[in-house]
């Protein structure tokens, strides 16, 4: 599949999942009374499962080696989760941005890095 088409699909699914992430984070923080870091972590965990299946079936459309891809995806997920949480906390607690604005900034900053990581190392179709 053409790289631009993959990027387009990655962008649209990313926007939808990003909005879901914001909604879940806001709901758990403002309505549920949880700390924003815990809320954000829970929201990211929900979104990552949906993201994997969208990446597998819609964005990169690979049909083999699901188990190995999921293992690689999970490893990359934890690396990105750590980066997300660290950067959101930094922007919120050190720079004093609102936590939702921090999430927006971090998501934008990591967007292309995630795409190229997934495209080149996890969902590459070598078969």
Image: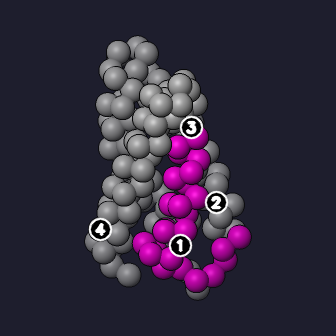
Q: Give the residue drawn at x 58%, y 40%.
A: 42
Residue 31 image point, x, y percent:
47, 31
- Left or right: 55 with respect to 100? right
Q: What element carries label 2?
A: helix
Q: Mark 3 points at which residue?
A: 41
Instruction: Describe the colour scheme in one phrase.
Output: one colour
Q: Quadrant of residue 4?
A: bottom left
| C-alpha span from label 1 to label 2 | 12 Å
Residue nearer the viewer, 59 or 30: 30
| C-alpha span from label 2 to label 4 | 23 Å
Counting residues from the start of the chain, the first of labels 4 and 3 encountered is 4
Residue 72's tag is 2
Residue nearer the viewer, 93 or 40: 40
Q: Mark 1 points at which residue?
A: 56
Q: Is the magenta stretch mostly helix, strand or loop?
A: helix
Counting residues from the start of the chain, the first of labels 4 and 1 encountered is 4
Residue nearer the viewer, 49 or 78: 49
Please tell me whether residue 92 belongs to the stretch shown in magenta. no
Q: Give the residue drawn at x 65%, y 64%.
A: 70
Q: Nearer the viewer, mark 2 or mark 4?
A: 4
Residue 8's tag is 4
Q: Which of marks 4 and 3 is in front?
A: 3
| C-alpha span from label 4 to label 1 | 15 Å
User: What is the crowding at mark 4: few (fewer than 14 residues within 10 Å), some, or many (at least 20)?
Assistant: few
The answer to whether 83 is drawn above or below residue 20 in the figure is above
Residues drawn in magenta? 42-67
Q: Give the residue drawn at x 49%, y 68%.
A: 55
| C-alpha span from label 3 to label 1 | 23 Å
Residue 67 image point, x, y percent:
71, 70
């Amino acid at each position: 599949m053409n790289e631009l088409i993959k990027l387009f699909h990655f962008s649209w699914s990313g926007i939808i999942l990003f909005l879901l992430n914001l909604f879940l984070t806001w709901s758990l923080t403002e309505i549920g009374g949880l700390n924003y870091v815990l809320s954000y972590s829970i929201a990211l965990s929900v979104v990552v499962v949906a993201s994997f299946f969208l990446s597998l079936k819609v964005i990169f459309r690979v049909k083999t080696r699901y188990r190995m891809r999921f293992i690689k995806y999970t490893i990359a997920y934890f690396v990105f989760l750590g980066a997300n949480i660290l950067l959101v906390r930094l922007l919120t607690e050190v720079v004093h941005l609102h936590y939702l604005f921090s999430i927006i900034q971090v998501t934008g900053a990591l967007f292309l890095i995630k795409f190229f990581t997934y495209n080149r190392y996890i969902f590459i179709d070598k078969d």
